[in-house]
Amino acid sequence: MALSDAEWTAIRLSLRVAAVAMFFSLPLALAVAMALARGRFWGKSLLNGLVHMPLILPPVVTGFLLLLLFGRRGPIGAFLAEYLGLVFSFRWTGAALAAAVMGFPLMVRSIRLSIEAVDRKLESAAATLGAGPAWIFLTVTLPLILPGILAGMVLSFAKSMGEFGATITFVSNIPGETQTLSLAIYSLTQVPGGDAGAMRLTVISITVSMAALMFSEFLAAAATKRMVAA
């Protein structure tokens, strides 16, 4: 199954976009998951709704909202472009942003479930021994929720690899710049004789997605066993 240079470029770009989206989402996802799992504040339900909104809205709507906010004329996009030189619209960075937004709910949910499954008595025991909140989190909570964090990262990565609607709406379909794996498959289906290339990329996409889901299930099972043993 020989791949063309354009197909390899789309695969490499997809991996780059998915990795950047996953790693940059992680700190915020961890903070939001902690707030939703442990926090008691006004607007918690609203925050939960906003976090999961990308799963409910059509991806095209999400992409359009990103274009309004982060486009060159958008309030956030114009500020970032002028003062930080960071441009999202029609750039691979925009594809990473779109992928991060779409994968964010999956990461938050996975981490939140892990936090809610932690036995608070273990944290209380560490507190009675004189440990501070930061040390308790690093030595007790974080090791217990680590499988959930890893599972959320895997799910976010897989979602980012397959993102289509928000990406094409926000950053278009530019070969070598924003054309990810899904967009390359779409482009190949629109040209005569492109079915073979589309099939090759489809097989790769299915393989990556299945591997990610199986790995996520393995991590979830490991987390369950760890909680039972604790």
Image (cartoon, rainbow, N blue to C red):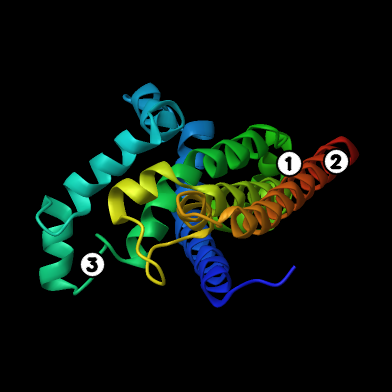
Check disc 2 and report its element: helix, strand or loop: loop
**Quadrant of residue 65 within the rendered picture:** top left
| N-terminal-most mark, 1 or 3 | 3
Q: Spatial distance from mark 1 to mark 3, Cα to Cα?
A: 45 Å
Q: Spatial distance from mark 2 to mark 3, Cα to Cα?
A: 47 Å
**Quadrant of residue 226 within the rendered picture:** top right
1 vs 3, front mark: 3
Tell me the kind of residue under disc 3: Val
In this figure, which residue is indicated by the disc labeled 3? 87
Assign the N terminus to one quadrant of the image: bottom right
Q: Spatial distance from mark 1 to mark 2, Cα to Cα?
A: 9 Å
Residue neighbourhood size for the residue with mark 1, other residues' Cα within 10 Å, grouped as few (<14), some (14–19), many (≥20): few
| N-terminal-most mark, 2 or 3 | 3
Residue at the spot 55% in from the left edge and 39% down from the top edge: 106
In this figure, which residue is indicated by the disc labeled 1? 122
Question: Which of the two residues, 69 or 125, is positioned nearer the viewer here?
Answer: 69
Q: Give the x, y percent position of residue 178.
A: 38, 63
Residue at the spot 36% in from the left edge and 57% down from the top edge: 173
Q: How many marks?
A: 3
